Amino acid sequence: MGFEASNEERTDAQLLAAHVTGDKNAFGELVYRHRDRLWSVALRTTSDPEEAADALQDAFLSAFRRADQFRGEAAVTTWLHRIVVNACLDRLRRRTSRPAVPLPDDLGQTLADPGDQMSRRETQLVIAAALATLPPDQREAIVLVDVEGRSIQETAELLGCPTGTIKSRCSRGRARLAEELAFLRNRNEPDTVIPKMGSPAKPSPATPLAEINTSEGGASHV
């Protein structure tokens, strides 16, 4: 009689394959293994717990339905990471197209403080929309390095490509973002600096998107 490995002993790829073939418990185990890390990714990308929770739910549903499209060209965690980031950016991009939020009751005080939370949040939404316009490979590199604060080396290992490729993708992506977001840098208000799309309660060494430069390998992480 053959020995069947338990969920705990199976690799991520084996769990995903088992899910595709009808194992009702395999995908749940996969989510359980990586939910904390993927929640962190969603929260840092959206800077909003509610948006992060909704995006993560969207991502898990998408991964559940598209599991048969996984070809093993990257790690399962990388595949899941991409789905979560794309779900976050999709939600934020849709939010920017919604009607403007109602004016607050303390409008005078709000206008007197151009660095208020609403202003920063709107700026983050604009950045998210700009990120969503990048080609997937550039967007992945920018999110990992500039949003999540990962090093070039760590990003290269995660995406399975040379460090030079990551530097090039970051450089091209930053150049495009610099054009898309130039108007933010031209403001005279104190919040000119483009805020990093991460949880303010847990700062990281990520390069703020305001420090976008167009030099090859312009990331501060090596």
Image (cartoon, grey):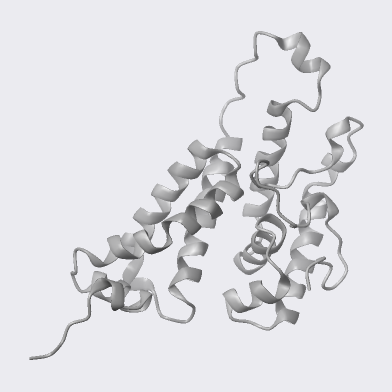
Q: Which residue is depicted at the point 47% across and 76% down? A: 75
Q: Is residue 171 above or below residue 196?
A: below
On screen, 186 above or below 3? Answer: above
Q: Residue at x 77, y 12 (%)?
A: 109
Please state the total of marks drawn on the protein image: 0
Say which of 41 and 218 sits in front.
41
- Residue lying farthest to the left in this orientation: 1
The quarter of the displayed image where residue 95 is located: top right
Which residue is at the front of the view, 57 or 204?
A: 204
Q: Residue 94, how many percent across, how many down?
A: 54, 40
Q: Residue at x 52, y 39 (%)?
A: 49
Residue 220 against residue 129 in the figure, above or below? below
User: Is 196 rendered above or below residue 96?
Assistant: below
Please report the residue visible at 47 percent of the width from the left and 60 percent of the height from the top. Answer: 83
The N terminus - image quarter: bottom left
Task: Give 33 or 123, whichever is nearer the viewer.
Answer: 33
x, y percent for residue 30: 34, 65
Quarter the C terminus occupies: bottom right
Q: Position of residue 26 (x, y in %)?
A: 26, 67
Q: Position of residue 8 (x, y in %)?
A: 29, 72
> Which one is nearer the viewer's eye here, 160 or 66?
160
- For residue 215, side relative to residue 61 (left or right): right
Q: Quadrant of residue 217?
A: bottom right
Task: Determine the residue located farthest toward the bottom in the rendered image.
Answer: 1
Left or right: residue 8 compared with residue 50: left
